[in-house]
Image: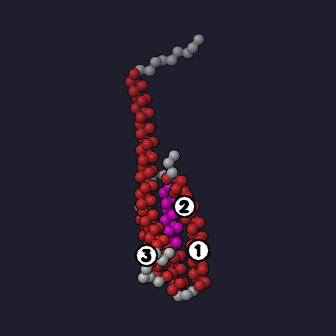
Amino acid sequence: MFPRFRRLAPHLHLGRALLLLLALSSAGCGRFTRTRQCRKLIAQVNPALDEVLTLTDGGVGGAGHSGGARYVLAAARYERLAKDLGPMEFSSEQMAKSVAEYASVLTSSAQALRSLGAALDSNNLPEADRANHELERLNIRERSAVSRMDAWCQPE
């Protein structure tokens, strides 16, 4: 009436247990790798953004520099950060693309900051306004890339 199942040999139970253990450990290893990659990214990005903020808001880092020079220094910091992100590796192609997009936004922002600095130094208000609009546009792209990176870095 009831179907008969063959009893598995003891070595097959051991094999299944080893496969289950391997699957669980690789899932945990992937999570650990992702966490390590996110922490490395954060360690690169946050200090650089703090420097840029200090420079552009006229904080201590901007002391002694004219308005235009501060933006040029901030642009150089963005470019250095974009270069530092280039060789980083991620276990997800999607994350690698998001970081590459973020680096592209940083490079474009650096160009706009240089334009803004030059416009301020030459008192060219229309050019300064154009550079500000470009920075606002780039801010939208930046938020999008950061949002994707944040989502990838969230624990599952």
Q: Is residue 79 visible?
A: no
Q: Is residue 132 above or below residue 28?
A: below
Q: Is residue 130 above or below residue 5?
A: below
Q: Residues within 10 Å of mark 3 (few under 14, many from 20)?
A: few
Residue at horizontal 58%, vertical 76%?
132
- In this orientation, which residue lies closer to the viewer: 84 or 54? 54
Q: Is residue 121 visible?
A: yes
Span colored in magenta: 94-109
Residue 32: percent from left, percent from top: 42, 47
Q: Which residue in the structure is indicated by mark 3?
A: 60
Q: Which residue in the structure is indicated by mark 1?
A: 134
Q: Which residue in the structure is indicated by mark 2?
A: 145
Occupied quadrant, residue 83: bottom left
Helix, strand or loop at disc 3? helix
Q: Residue furthest front?
A: 60
Residue at horizontal 51%, vertical 51%?
154
Residue 60: percent from left, percent from top: 43, 76
Q: Residues within 10 Å of mark 1 (few under 14, many from 20)?
A: some
Three-letter code, disc 2: Ala
Three-letter code, disc 1: Glu
Q: CA distance from mark 1 to mark 2?
A: 17 Å
Residue at horizontal 52%, vertical 15%?
4
**Which mark lies nearer to you, 1 or 3?**
3
Q: Earlier in the sequence, mark 1 or mark 2?
A: 1
Residue 137: percent from left, percent from top: 60, 70
Left or right relative to 156: residue 18: left
Three-letter code, disc 3: Val
Q: Residue furthest top?
A: 1
Q: Are marks 3 and 2 in contact (CB under 8 Å)?
A: no
Q: CA distance from mark 1 to mark 3?
A: 26 Å
Q: CA distance from mark 3 to mark 2?
A: 29 Å
Q: Is residue 95 magenta?
A: yes
